Image (cartoon, coloured by chain):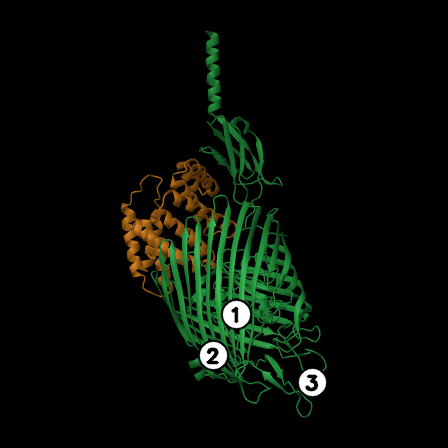
Amino acid sequence: MKNQITFIICLLLVSVSSAQLRVNGIVTDKSDTPIFGANVYLEGTYDGSSTDENGKFSFETTETGTQTLVISMLSYESHYEMGDVSYFKDISIQLVEAVNSLNGVTLMAGTFEAGDNSKVSVLKPLDIVTTAGAAGDFVAALQTLPGTTTVNEDGRLFVRGGDASETQVFIDGLRVFQPFNATANNIPTRGRFSPFLFKGITFSTGGYSAEYGQALSSVLLLNTIDVPEQEKTDISIMSVGGGIGHTKIWGNQSLSFNTSYVNLAPYEALIPSNQGVRWNSPYESISGEAVFRNKSDNGIFKLYTGFNHADLDIEQENINFEDFVRFQLTNNNLYFNSSYKHFFKSNWTLTSGASVSWDANDIGLLDNIIDVKETGSHLKLKLKKGFSNRFNLSFGAELFNLDYEETFKAPNDSEFKSNYDDQLVAGFVEGDIFFSNKFAMKLDARVENTSVLDDFSFSPRVSLAYQSSEKGQFSFAYGDFYQNPQNNILGYNQDLEPQKTSHYILNYQYLDNGKTFRVEAYYKDYDNLLKFDTELPQFNSQFNNLGSGYASGLDIFWRDNKSIKNLDYWVSYSYLNTERDFRNFEERATPNFAAKHNLSIITKKWVNKLRSQVGLSYNYASGRPYNNPNTTEFLAEKTKAFNNLSFNWAYLIDQQKILYFSINNVLGFNNINNYQYADTPNVNGVFDRQTIRPAADSFFFVGFFWTISTDKKSNQLDNL
Amino acid sequence: MQKAMDLWSEQKIVEASNMFERIATAEMDNWLPYYYVAMVNTTASFGEKDEKKLKQQLEKAKEYIDIAKNISPDNAEILVQEAMINTAWMAFDSATYGMTLSGKNFQLYKKAAELAPENPRVVFGQAEWNMGAARYFGKDVTPYCMDIKKSLELFATFKPESQFHPNWGQERAEQVVKDCKS
């Protein structure tokens, strides 16, 4: 009997002690510093507690047997401890810092982003379009970033000693074959695409990933909006034309379109451009863009299409002709871009897409007629797997098809045709490795095979990032880049090789609450540059790949939008030291498009009382080299420096109506783009010259923008 | 649940958030603890100066409100809470988030109003949101004041489904309506 009682008491004791088991311990980080506020609990139960200031936790549980103890804390990886509850006594747990994009190191050498949440964003989405002097052209806004050179008469992107053809543009990862509007010499062009349809822009001035090829200097990546926020209609009436856009949403599908008509004739009638030009028929274009999107549970499909028809007829002064030289241009461009992204459960992402473009230029130059037809297509397949938040792998393949045909008709009816076909196959692999929140590496490789040149190339690319303090980080990038010679040259000669550059980039960035400072030093080595023995490439030129060159420099960027209330400003400075031997150069020299110093100061102020945003931009570029045939030295003289001060003012009449006004070159600086010398010396044995100036020094723009949306709140401020 | 509520009212933000989180993982098909994890972190972020902490809190809030949405789709209370998270982002940096999130918030309130036109938090949230913009453009705010008064009537008669269902906002509405008269 006594034994029985003892047994029962024992049983009771056991059950009592099992009913109230104490779980306790301490949570620290790797360096044994206690972590406060970590959540410690038994999975699937209510039992748990938070750690105190000393990292200690303690709670009681009625659970028995094998349980999982979970320790979770923001910015640390969750820790799971499996075992019998009775073992969770006086345990010490070390949490490992989670690698995440928010606080971690970013692989960013050479890259500028404009977006919402990205840490590498230096421009906000609005900036692309509210920058004075940019007049809604996002390419012009990018020209305020360091690494670019102002080439006033061109309008395209010249990056780090490279010419404009060395930059490629991609929409949703697919190549855009003709990203710029066709134009005449010395009349700056604009980007073909309205900023309206894009949510993120990445501009890389070097060292970009192996996914992108056929660009020696730079890539510009545009991403279309995944899901528009609301239905709306945008109407714009401008001094140079008008436009209408609409977005419609049905459940998971949406369609946005945007059409615009531009005609410079009324403006030219009012304020004629008269510096070395006469317009017979000023630039006139009609264009349309549309994006269709379909979002499903685990995939997103997008179809982008753009059409543009442009006409112009201009006469330009030319020292080698007594009369002005007439240039007529009709351009038709049709572009499709469709992509599909699928997310698999196992952390695989598949991206596939195709783009195709048809472009036709009919050019009348003096009495010659030049017809250029170009068809380009790009197919791409990419797979990405996130193995953990420390390792990502992606790889893919792509195929480019180019078909180029040029017909030259002289007044005597003689005809000359040149054409080529190219199939370029490429494969790439990229590995992102995050060793810790402080140190990351990206290892990439790309292979390409081009049929027209019968050439195979291999480009390794590496990028490293090290976070030196909470706010500062160092990055380094190296890469090899190949690009085929330009279309018109391949039409004449195909016994050539791709041109090559190697980039070495060292970057430091410091971010502190609304302030961004970055400085980047680089060296670029150019090899296999194309040379020819005539003034311009033509069918009887002798071509070779014996050119070479280098570019080195320093890019500095500073932005501050916190120190002064309602004032946002940024300053970019680029120092460029470059020489190259290419085209018909006699020797290595700094090319005409490379200015040694470039400076941009952009300011924007929101004036609450006036409900206005006013912006002021100043742009400086030191003199650019030109060749004076009266001297023995090649490309040894320099134009005077370029100066431009632009102003814009956006006034919100009400929530949905905006009046916008801008002036380029307010102070009317008489900028000089270049000098043109006569082909033959005059009677005194001197080559005469003529100054090439912008067609007009200043440009005015007035626009009224009206948005009609259900929320009565949206407006087009972000599109200006 | 009550204990977590008590911790919260004692301003023990971390403990309250952790406790709601524990309840959430134990009751995987109940949207309320997820809702409260989001709400605790959102309200704590208003006035938070430390940018890093603020971003972590708001991202956590978004993560939990997304789960709550999956458990209980078409729930007006959850949509109002989601709009609160967006408002916190905008309060933190209107230049970066204003343009993109204000459209989203409009949509959220619109959908919430379709789902629960008589919910006082929906009526009040939407009215306060519209009032801010109207005031900025010097427009008449009277119609929104009317809405807020209507929300006060709704608050007075509102019966939450349980003691843990959302039942906040009346005090704030009373404050805002004072500005209307002046």
Which residue in the structure is indicated by mark 3?
Answer: A630
The residue to which callout 1 is attached is: A140
Is any atom of residue A653 visible in this view?
no
Q: Earlier in the sequence, mark 3 or mark 1?
A: 1
Q: Colour of chain A?
A: green
Residue in the picture at 53% in, 26% down: A86
- Residue A423 drawn at (x, y percent): 56, 61
List the single residue furthest toward the top: A1
Q: How many marks?
A: 3
Dot 1: what SS?
helix
The crowd level at tag 3 (other Cα within 10 Å; few <14, some 14-19, many 20+) is few
Give the residue drawn at x 56%, y 46%: A99
- Going 52% across and 27% down the picture, which residue do you hit? A84
Q: Position of residue A628 (x, y in %)?
A: 67, 82
Give the residue pinned by disc 2: A312
Residue A304 located left or right of residue A671: left
- The answer as to whether the residues below labels 3 and 1 share one chain is yes
Amino acid type assigned to the residue bearing label 3 in the image: Asn
Left or right of residue A406: residue A236: left
- Nearer to us in this view, B165 or A108: A108
**Chain letter for the residue marked with disc 3 in the picture:** A
